[in-house]
Image (cartoon, grey):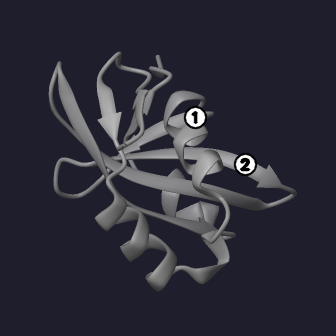
Amino acid sequence: MTPVVQSRGGVPIRLTAERWTYIVEEHAELAGMREEDLETVTDAARIVEGQGGELLAVRTMEQSRAIVVVYREVDQSDGFIITAFLTRRLASIDRRQQFWPRTK
């Protein structure tokens, strides 16, 4: 069964088996962290816009390391996870337009 979580925008977001396999093949450090990936979408500290319409959910894991889950909201009733990765390069994420929480 494909797990589905709710994004901060209230959209159901799917993580298919094919996408999860791709994520752990490309980012082996995420093996065993499927639940953390899903939690990042629902409990992101912030969400920034990607370059092609996707959204990046960001959650700090430890010190200056964060998990980033890239996903797309197709419409109000459907969305899917594209990829995920761990990073210490938060400056590149900080330069992006913040989507949530809304800044003044």
Name the spot of residue 45 as percent of width and height, x first.
63, 33
Between 9 and 88, the residue placed more toward the observer is 9
Compare marks 1 and 2 and give the one earlier in the sequence.
1
**Which residue matches tag 2?**
60
Alpha-carbon neighbours of circle 2 within 10 Å: few (<14), some, or many (≥20)? Answer: some
Residue 80 image position (x, y, % from top left): 27, 45
Query: Is the residue 66 above or below the residue 89 in the image?
Result: above
- Of 8 and 52, nearer the camera is 8
Relative side of 70 to 35, left or right: left
Instruction: Tell me how many marks there are.
Output: 2
Please tell me which residue lies in front, 95 or 71.
Answer: 71
| Residue 25 drawn above or below residue 48 | below
Q: Are marks 1 and 2 in contact (CB under 8 Å)?
A: no
Q: For the point 65% across and 48% down, which residue is it? A: 36
Residue appearing at x 49%, y 37% in the figure: 41
- Residue 61 located left or right of residue 31: right
Q: Residues within 10 Å of mark 1 (few under 14, many from 20)?
A: many
Residue beneath label 1, please?
44
Q: CA distance from mark 1 to mark 2?
A: 9 Å
Q: Position of residue 71 (x, y in %)?
A: 32, 48
Dot 2: what SS?
strand
Q: For the N terminus, which image quadrant?
A: top left
Residue lying farthest to the left in this orientation? 75
